[in-house]
Amino acid sequence: MSITTILKDTNHRPWKIPSHRWNYYQEWNRAIFLHWKVDLELLKPFIPNEIEIDLFNGKPWVSLVAFTMEKIRPRLLPPFSPISNFDEINIRTYVKSNNKTGVYFLSIEGGKRFSCQLAKTLSRLPYRYSKIKRSPNSYQSYNSQYNDRLNIQFNIGDNIIHKTEIDCWLTERYALFQDSKKHINEYEIHHHEWPINTIDLISLDIKYSRFENLIGDKPTISQYSDGVKVIAWDRVKSSK
């Protein structure tokens, strides 16, 4: 599938793609989505005042997304698999800023130390290294700095599901907003609509002490996707 084909598929987007040239290509493959409906007052302390929390039927959501990043590369360079391919976990919530709906990362982990350092330097996103191991039916991680751990055992459903309104609200997000010391950074992305399968969680052991009031052992919604091919633009900075 060509990048031109991806860029022409825009009917599912809530706003037009950026008119300037894109900067990065990447693939988010074999993704496990775990979603929790949460209490607004418990979420507020984690979000900068400059960013509005997005709500679905009056409630905010927090998600853990565990996937494999592959073929990430700058626009004019090929991927280099020892760096460009790595497992990733992000914990995110849903926000609004600059008249756009997007996501905000509470946590972002990568399974290769140098890839995390490089991604943090280039993107200014808060990457940190965790030990991550996955197989076709399991995903495990451990972070020694925070004593965070994740162990998912699962089976993937056979059929792609017809997405409901909440499925689309949780997955079809085309902007990321993240704070730095002086700025709110905005990142735009584009991809085909996520294909979603059902997933059967055989067991789930999750411990992120900082977020224990937001995510727990039984998610409200669980999903699986084979993945999407992603076009990304460089960050745009706005003053706090």
Image: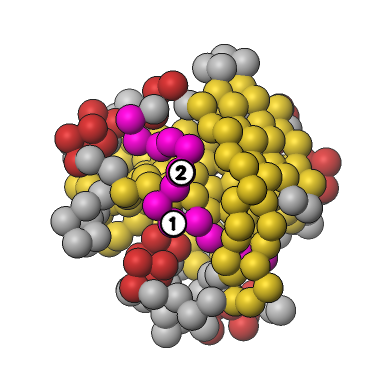
Decide if residue 151 is on the left or right side of residue 13.
right
- Work out whether residue 199 or residue 127 is closer to the camera in this orientation and state it: 199
- Residue 65 percent location from the top left of the image: 53, 48
Specify few, some or many for label 1: CA neighbours under 10 Å numbering under 14, 14-19, or 20 or more: some
The stretch of residues the image draws in magenta is 213-228
Q: Amino acid at mark 1?
A: Ile
- Residue 21 percent location from the top left of the image: 52, 66
> Disc count in the image?
2
Quadrant of the frame with the C terminus: top left
Residue 218: which numbered mark, if any? 2
- Residue 84 percent location from the top left of the image: 74, 46
Q: Residue at x 75, y 36 (%)?
A: 133
- Under circle 2, the secondary element is loop
Specify few, some or many for label 2: CA neighbours under 10 Å numbering under 14, 14-19, or 20 or more: some
Q: Quadrant of residue 171?
A: bottom left
- Work out whether residue 213 or residue 174 is closer to the camera in this orientation and state it: 213
Q: For the residues carrying marks 1 and 2, which lies nearer the camera in this image?
A: 2
| The stretch drawn in magenta includes residue 61 | no
Residue 221: which numbered mark, if any? 1
Can you see residue 236? no
- Residue 75 percent location from the top left of the image: 65, 59
- Under circle 1, the secondary element is strand
- Work out whether residue 20 or residue 231 is closer to the camera in this orientation and state it: 231
Q: Amino acid at mark 2?
A: Lys
